[in-house]
Amino acid sequence: MQNYNETDMENEQIHGDPHPLFLYERDTEYIPRIAAVHDLCGYGKCSLGVAIPVLSAAGCDVCPVPTGLFSSHTAFPGWYMHDTTSILQDYLEAWRGIDVQIDAIYSGFLGAPEQVDIIRSLYRTYPDALTFVDPVMADHGKVYPTYTPELCSAMAELAKEADVLTPNLTEAAIILGEPIGDAWQGADIPDEEAERIVRALLELGAKNVVLKGIQREGETVMRNFVGSASNATAGCITQVQNEFVPYMLHGTGDVYASCVLAGLMAGRSLVESVAFAGNFVHDAMIVSAKQPNFMDRGVSFEPLLGKVSALL
């Protein structure tokens, strides 16, 4: 197993990566288009409120496909949700009518099981697009309140079709149909178990897997495990580390996944993109802690968007 940390990232190109995996070849003159299939949240930065600025900073044209409208994220005691499932077929059919071209399909939080079929219709319309699935449905052993068993099952099926899949431990357990143990709730598992989970997700069909957020009691690092089904890297699990910040903020998972995709669309390797994402989230959490009511506001990444642009 290969190990990388943020120092390697700062030294550029992550020295020692035996088979750097590039999933998108960036033409310096071309601006790629990304269909961002996420909810739109009014307060508490997450989902489209994160994906649009981060990917735009990476020189991408972000085309939102809103899976739901939220007054705020669901960690607040009172919130409103409007399910947009009924409009999405007509919404995307209108795209087809004006010949919208898409280079990547990035899905996250979904509002209903039927939305998985809508995402699959996008896959059929754009068969050459990179498919990036962040299976946003649970964390720390708990399923999000709007997620039914049917929606979790549908998300697990979608995960099998991803070019890149980025689950946390709880989401990985749901996808694999495994029980969520106490250690998983605390994200404290040994390397061998993390590697087993990555390989199991690859065996289900995902082409590349980033298992994120492994943090062990008493340690000061956050571990992310990267595996690929490609012939060049099959069987090789890479561990990417960054410094652990000892508090939790809503929306960091959305920032992380968006930064991974930003790196890929900028023409960086998968491991390099994962290293960048971990460092960016770390830095954003430091910035966030200096803001009033930062635990409610969510992660503050805006002053750091220049780092995303620098990927180009």
Image: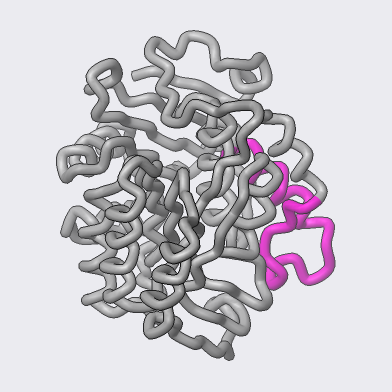
Q: Main secondary structure of the magenta part?
A: helix
**The image quarter in which residue 62 lies:** bottom right
Name the one closer to the observer, 88 or 258. 88
Q: Quadrant of the C terminus?
A: top right
Residue at image location 44% in from the left, 24% down from the top: 22
Residue 133 drawn in magenta: no
The x and y percentages for residue 132 are 40, 47
Colouring = one colour
Q: Nearer the viewer, residue 199 or 181?
A: 199
Q: Quadrant of the N terminus?
A: top left
What residue range appears in magenta? Answer: 277-302
Going 22% across and 76% down the picture, which residue do you hit? 150
Q: Residue sitting at 38 percent across and 80 percent down?
A: 85
Estimate the x, y position of residue 87 in percent, counting from the top left: 42, 82
Looking at the image, which is closer to me, 178 or 34?
A: 34
Q: Position of residue 29 (x, y in %)?
A: 65, 30
| Residue at x-position 62% and y-position 44% | 60
